[in-house]
Image (tube, helix red, strand yellow):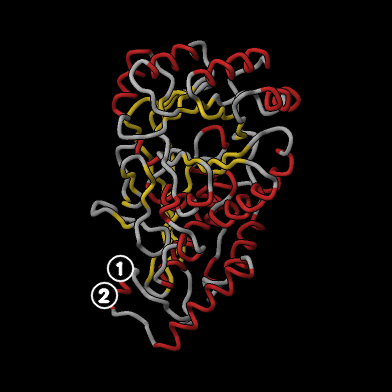
Amino acid sequence: MKKRDFIKISGLVAGALITGCKGSPGDRASGLVMGAGKSGGVMKLSYKPYELQLRHVFTVAASSRTTTPVVLTTIEYDGIKGFGEASMPPYLGESHESVLSFLSKVDLEQFHDPFMREDILAYIEGIMPGNHAAKASLDIALHDLTGKLLGQPWFRLWGLDPQKAPVTSFTIGIDTAEVVKEKTLEASPYKLLKIKMGRDNDREMIDTVRSVTDVPVFVDVNQGWKDRNYALEMANYLSERGALFIEQPMPKEQIDDIAWLTENSPLPIIADEALQTVDDLLLMKGVYSGINIKLMKCGGMDAAYKMITMARQMGMKILIGCMTETSCAVSAAAQLSPLVDWADLDGNLLISNDIYEGMTVVDGKITLPDRPGIGIIEKKSGNL
């Protein structure tokens, strides 16, 4: 935890203790507690696997799928529940089995103060390397819990203006021209579109989208282009058609080719698969124009905040993104959105069985709920 974060949280807790503002039993049950003090309680972790059902077949350069496995976590302390989530798209290498195995090794009952976030996250990190989505689920739940104990949303604890949250993109997956046109028309409420590319119909994808809308777009190639000259040709083509930037155009191993493309491209080149944790960030300088930060890749909100701060110092553009997720993880990422240049937080909009309510999109813009923690509530059908 950064020193200023600790001072801010400690001050809020101290103020609550001085005024004796504990909240009514009804407030505590809903998590709306304006500064609950330490009670020497125990943090209890629970979790369960869940399968997200996608509204449409989701096709990228290398694969297609109709479901995404997630694990939903809860950390309970002093009668208050914090919610988290691990989402496991295939390319990350995590699964229901790996996340459940990791979480089974976590003993949070040894900690009696959820505000000792630095110690708790250091313990979680030390259990075993990797497992970033599993770790993110705990980080998110811990942030949700402590925000609820303080009665404040995290964008406010970070001192961020929710009005500065950007619009979010809506993703158009690779498909036939007919289906792409249909999906684009369905996405008419959104002011920014992300177009998946990287197969043999790149120009058709863009031309089809442009046949029905002139809203700004960016493209996500998912490492699908192998030749740098073709990549530059496409960059010029896309620039002429109003694209804003290109996300991970070439395989992450082709560092020299990507650096050459970044130097010559009329559009910013944004790292996605090439970047996972804060340890990778310094390697992006001079190779990419900017980065895509995802909680499931970096390990959660704490790591994402550090990456944003560091990337700004490096002069890089920032996109905050997500996997296919419920409103839990998407709303957690949205707490950071006032700090970034662009947002791609539509993972919850692509599924049909979300069990939470949280961040909403109003006239294409991210709208943060003024609820404590990460701002989510369980839908009536939710049973975690």
Residue at the far right in the pictured view:
256
Which residue is under mark 1? Answer: 30
In the rendered structure, the answer to whether residue 51 lies left or right of residue 220 reads left
Q: Is residue 83 above or below residue 247?
A: below
Q: Which residue is more in the foreground, 339 or 44?
A: 339
Give me the residue at 40% from left, 51% from top.
328
Q: Residue 235's image quarter?
A: top right
In the rendered structure, the answer to whether residue 161 lies left or right of residue 133 reads left
Which residue is under mark 2? Answer: 26
Q: Is residue 23 above or below residue 344?
A: below
Give me the residue at 42% from left, 35% from top.
169
Q: Position of residue 331 (x, y in %)?
A: 41, 51
Q: Would you say the residues marked 1 and 2 are in contact, meaning their CB atoms lie under 8 Å apart?
A: yes
- Give the distance between the C-alpha atoms of the residues marked 1 and 2, in whole angstroms: 7 Å
Give me the residue at 46% from left, 60% from top.
155
Q: Position of residue 330 (x, y in %)?
A: 43, 47
Type of amino acid at the residue the image marks with label 2: Gly
Mark 1 falls on what kind of element? helix
